[in-house]
Image (tube, grey):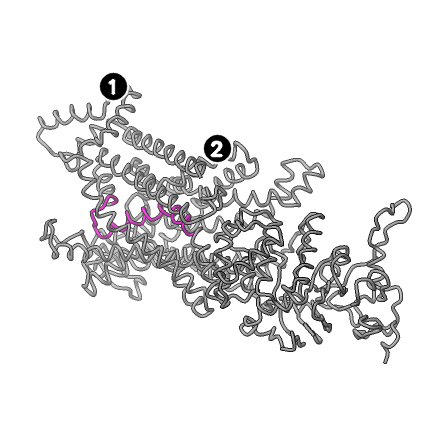
């Protein structure tokens, strides 16, 4: 088991290292002077621009050799200093991101967990009878083939505009500001529902289809046949098949994280939901390099942490990995 | 070694419902993509209708946008772009996947370890984030560039699958037999392993095609797709940007999304059907 | 009378038609009898085993009657058979090494299986432990996962499991095929112990290896191409077989101490017929040296001497 975790940690560390390096490289890809590009978009008093130019040149470290810039970047990272945003000057990038994180967590965590659990249960259920299978299959395929943003658009249009039961923009009503009260919580949930539903439905389809296929595969295995030969009731056979089919579905979840993050990003854009994805896009459109770097970093860290969490859960759930014999590993 | 007759494949292929339905849908849209642009006189971005947004009619089959652009024209040309990126991006991803996955699977040992590590790293990184950032820094982008980016970030899936398949094929008896009879590595790869991989490669490519289409639509929707031309994702981008939702101009955003859903869904179903044709065990009696 | 089969016909459904894998089997297994079923690959012995225990598509029941201890076995009815499976008729399958759920501890799986059949593992624990001792498995295996056991150990565990509720008939399907010779002997002897200690009443051992059957079986039934060829006591089959196929089969076995330089091994020329469209009549006809025109009709499987059944027109009494 140590070997299993050792390998995983190595991959995550390497990935983090690579990601941070890419993150650092990005603004330096730009043709021209990144500082000048940033400043040309800001309509501010000329004296202020000079001060900002000086600050940003130092902040970017463009006045020191390249390798030192790289090391400085790492140092700043460990201090939690992600720079200052240009687009939302003078707010610190770290602060902006931390404000956005709760919205993402609130959106992604329930969407991922619930769609995985419900989708798997539903897919297993569908494998029971032929007619159920025939109705669930096309439905599942349609859902999983739906682009996230299109479903978001449809939901926003149908429920937000035509039927007017849900709002379709922002995380809370414009006439409110965040505070602790039932009214605010209710308002947030009201705004949260459509983006959540959008993310939930697409993933749900994918898991249902996947589980249905896995269950059929498990039901054809030797241990299933043996139980049937001994006359075990269908319920027991199905229970074992389901538990065993969950394992590859769990690994599958880890693999899907990149796709899910992409979906969340696009959904946030459709609903103007102030998560990190939405911020990233705004930062790109406004060429705010610090904010871009910060968003990218947060996304990578989230994905790595989620992967790691799933690895831990997998070990807890698959007895074979615990005993040192690997079943499903990378 | 068993060589399956081509005719046997075609026999099962024609009888398989999923394959028939899936392939028909994809072919239908392909026909629209090829023929569609000839059916309309208007360029996709041309301001053809002075009346602005109008619902579908005899003159404009899919209606017009807020700027009076012919939606059907946009749709037809957009389909072309979609198919192009799907094929090219999916093709590149499959190619990279084959090279990396096959090398890892066939060679084993250190090569395998190194390539595997690389695959896992690229796999973990959320590709859209990378795509966003790369795309954002290019002033001018074309369809080919987009396809290359998508292909270069989507290959880990293919590499993994092909590596697994290579492992299983490598240890099969007919390969051992060929090695025993003194065949050279190259010959073994091409004559013994490749034919068995072909069917698998087709399955992998179909999935990559679907994935590339979705990725492209997402990129286009955010506005980081090709800077010229039109695509289905771009249609949706414009629609949302110009308030189609609020103005109930549903004909602007429903067709493109519907087309993507239909094509990708059909591709998935085709994939399953093909799998059944290739693997006798999955065939229904 | 433990098991009786009358004219059992079970075919395999394929897209090209029905493969007549088991075409008219009539035989008895008495109480306490260990019957070996031998024949070439594809002769129908595994089909026979599956027909009795788990008749699911692509297997298709055509006709025939099977009774166990006087009661009819509803082999064509998957649901009703559940009442008989494990308790009255049980099987140690060919895939025994993969037969246990890989993600469940063996003891836990056993407990759940027994509970689902209305038995309590706690009551059965002392007996279970005794049987584990008999097959030389440590009690600790109950606390392990299948992956921690060797192939032979898994096989013995499955043997214990399948016989746990003392079925009337235990079918052992090719259980020695994947083992080395000394383990084969041990396993075969364990099977006999099961019968001797009356864990099971009678047994059907399916194998292509006649030498195993020679050691442990009371009677041997020879099958060929989906039909029964001969059934008699082990001594008779090995020493004085009467069916042309059996004779050739026995004579083609290598003997210890005899070198090829002295006596060349005789095989049986030709190959078994494919069963999608089998030849009419006796299916051994094409390879038989004494075949004649009557062989175009299926010979009946009749008793030519006490407890000795043969299906051959050359036997006296077959014409009658």
Q: Are marks 1 and 2 on the same chain?
A: no
From the viewer's perspective, tell me whether residue A35 is left or right of residue A258. left
Out of A207 and A167, give the one closest to the viewer.
A207
Q: Position of residue A238 (x, y in %)?
A: 46, 62
- Badge 1: residue crowd in 10 Å (few <14, some 14–19, many ≥20): few
Percent coordinates x, y for residue C117 in the rendering: 51, 67
Chain label for disc 2: B
Residue located beneath label 1 in the image = A64
Q: Residues within 10 Å of mark 2 (few under 14, many from 20)?
A: few
Label tally: 2
Report which residue position mark 2 lands on. Answer: B114
Vertical order, B111 against B29 (above or below): above
Where residue B132 sits: x, y (%)? 31, 40
Q: Is residue B168 left or right of residue B266?
A: right
Up-down relation of residue A225 to residue C23 (above or below): above
Task: Give the extent of the magenta segment.
Answer: A248-277
Q: Which residue is more in the foreground, C119 or A95?
A: C119
Q: For residue A296, which quarter of the picture?
A: top left
Query: Looking at the picture, how far across and down is residue A313, in whole percent?
Result: 38, 47
Residue sitting at x 52%, y 56%: B274
Please say whether residue B43 is visible from this viewpoint. no
In three-dimensional space, the C-alpha distance between marks 1 and 2, rounded to whole angstroms, equals 35 Å
Secondary structure, mark 1, is loop
Q: Identify the image quadrant of residue C14.
A: bottom right
**1 vs 2, front mark:** 2
Q: Could you say which is closer to the camera, residue C152 or residue B190? A: C152
């Amino acid at each position: 088991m140590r070997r299993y975790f050792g390998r995983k940690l190595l991959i995550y560390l390497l990935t983090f290292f690579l990601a941070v390096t890419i993150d650092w490289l990005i603004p330096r890809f730009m043709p021209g002077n990144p500082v000048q590009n940033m400043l040309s978009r800001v309509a501010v008093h000329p004296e202020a621009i000079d001060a900002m130019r000086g600050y940003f040149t130092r902040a970017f470290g463009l006045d020191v050799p390249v390798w030192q810039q790289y090391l400085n970047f790492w140092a700043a990272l460990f201090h939690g200093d992600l720079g200052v945003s240009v687009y939302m000057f003078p707010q610190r990038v770290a602060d902006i991101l931390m404000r956005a994180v709760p919205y993402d967590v609130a959106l992604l965590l329930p969407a991922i967990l619930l769609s995985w659990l419900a989708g798997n249960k539903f897919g297993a259920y569908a494998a029971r009878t032929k007619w159920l299978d025939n109705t669930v299959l096309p439905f599942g395929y349609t859902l999983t083939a739906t682009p996230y943003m299109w479903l978001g658009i449809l939901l926003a249009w149908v429920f937000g505009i035509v039927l007017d039961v849900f709002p379709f923009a922002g995380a809370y009503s414009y006439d409110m500001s965040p505070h602790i009260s039932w009214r605010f919580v209710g308002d947030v949930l009201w705004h949260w529902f459509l983006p959540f539903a959008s993310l939930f439905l697409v993933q749900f389809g994918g898991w249902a289809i996947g589980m249905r296929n896995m269950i059929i595969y498990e039901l054809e295995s030797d241990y299933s046949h043996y139980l049937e030969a001994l006359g075990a009731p269908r319920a027991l056979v199905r229970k074992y098949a389901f538990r065993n089919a969950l394992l590859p579905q769990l690994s599958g979840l880890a693999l899907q994280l990149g796709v899910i993050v992409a979906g969340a990003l696009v959904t946030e854009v459709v609903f103007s939901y102030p998560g990190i994805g939405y911020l990233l896009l705004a930062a790109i459109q406004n060429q705010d390099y610090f904010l871009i770097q910060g968003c990218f970093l947060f996304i990578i860290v989230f994905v790595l942490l989620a992967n790691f969490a799933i690895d831990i859960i997998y070990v807890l759930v698959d007895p074979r990995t615990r005993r040192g014999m690997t079943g499903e590993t990378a | 070694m068993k060589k399956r007759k081509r005719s046997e494949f075609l026999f099962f292929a024609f009888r398989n419902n999923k394959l028939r339905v899936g392939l028909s849908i994809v072919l239908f849209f392909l026909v629209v993509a090829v023929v569609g642009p000839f059916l309309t006189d208007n360029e996709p971005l041309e301001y053809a209708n002075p009346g602005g947004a109008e619902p579908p009619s005899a003159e404009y089959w899919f209606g017009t946008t807020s700027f009076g652009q012919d939606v059907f024209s946009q749709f037809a040309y957009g389909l072309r772009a979609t198919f192009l990126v799907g094929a090219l991006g999916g093709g590149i991803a499959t190619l990279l996947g084959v090279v990396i996955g096959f090398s890892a699977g066939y060679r084993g040992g250190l090569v395998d370890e190194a390539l595997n590590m690389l695959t896992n790293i690229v796999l973990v990184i959320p590709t859209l984030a990378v795509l966003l950032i790369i795309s954002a820094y290019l002033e001018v982008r074309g369809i080919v560039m987009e396809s290359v980016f998508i292909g270069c970030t989507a290959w880990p899936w293919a590499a993994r699958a092909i590596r697994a398949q290579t492992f299983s094929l490598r240890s099969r008896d007919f390969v051992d037999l060929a090695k025993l009879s003194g065949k050279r590595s190259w010959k073994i790869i091409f004559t013994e392993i490749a034919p068995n991989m072909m069917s698998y490669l087709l399955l992998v490519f179909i999935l990559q095609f679907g994935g590339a289409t979705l990725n492209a639509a997402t990129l286009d929707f955010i506005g980081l797709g090709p800077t010229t031309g039109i695509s289905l994702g771009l249609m949706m981008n414009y629609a949302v940007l110009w308030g189609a939702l609020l103005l109930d101009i549903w004909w602007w955003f429903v067709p493109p999304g519907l087309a993507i859903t239909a094509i990708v869904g059909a591709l998935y179903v085709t994939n399953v059907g093909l799998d059944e044709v290739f693997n006798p065990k999955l065939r229904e009696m | 009378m433990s098991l009786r089969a009358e004219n059992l016909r079970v075919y395999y459904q394929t897209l090209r038609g029905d493969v007549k894998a088991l075409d008219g089997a009539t035989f008895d297994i008495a109480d306490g009898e260990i019957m070996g079923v031998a024949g070439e690959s594809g002769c129908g012995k595994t089909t026979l085993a599956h027909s009795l225990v788990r008749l699911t598509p692509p297997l298709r029941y055509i006709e025939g009657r099977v009774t166990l201890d006087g009661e009819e076995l509803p082999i064509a009815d998957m649901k009703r058979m559940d009442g008989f499976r494990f308790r009255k008729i049980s099987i140690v399958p060919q895939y025994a090494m993969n037969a246990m759920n890989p993600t469940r501890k063996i003891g836990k799986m056993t407990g759940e299986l027994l509970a689902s059949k209305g038995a309590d593992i706690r009551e059965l624990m002392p007996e279970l432990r005794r049987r584990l001792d008999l097959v030389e498995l440590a009690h600790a295996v109950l606390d392990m996962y299948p992956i921690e056991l060797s192939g032979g150990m898994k096989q013995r565990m499955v043997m214990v499991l399948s016989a746990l509720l003392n079925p009337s008939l235990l079918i052992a399907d090719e259980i020695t095929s994947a083992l080395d010779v000394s383990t084969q002997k041990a396993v075969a002897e364990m099977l006999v112990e099961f019968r001797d200690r009356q864990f099971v009443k009678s047994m059907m051992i399916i194998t292509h290896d006649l030498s195993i059957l020679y050691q442990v079986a009371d009677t041997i039934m020879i099958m060929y191409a989906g039909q029964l060829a001969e059934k008699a006591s082990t001594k008779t089959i090995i020493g004085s077989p009467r069916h042309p196929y059996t004779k050739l089969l026995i004579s083609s076995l290598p003997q210890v101490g005899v070198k090829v330089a002295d006596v060349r091994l005789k095989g049986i020329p030709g190959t078994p017929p494919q069963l999608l469209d089998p030849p009419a009549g006796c299916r051994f006809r094409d390879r038989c040296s004494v075949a004649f025109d009557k062989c175009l009709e299926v010979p009946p499987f009749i008793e030519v001497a006490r407890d000795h059944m043969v299906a051959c027109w050359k036997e006296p009494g077959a014409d009658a």
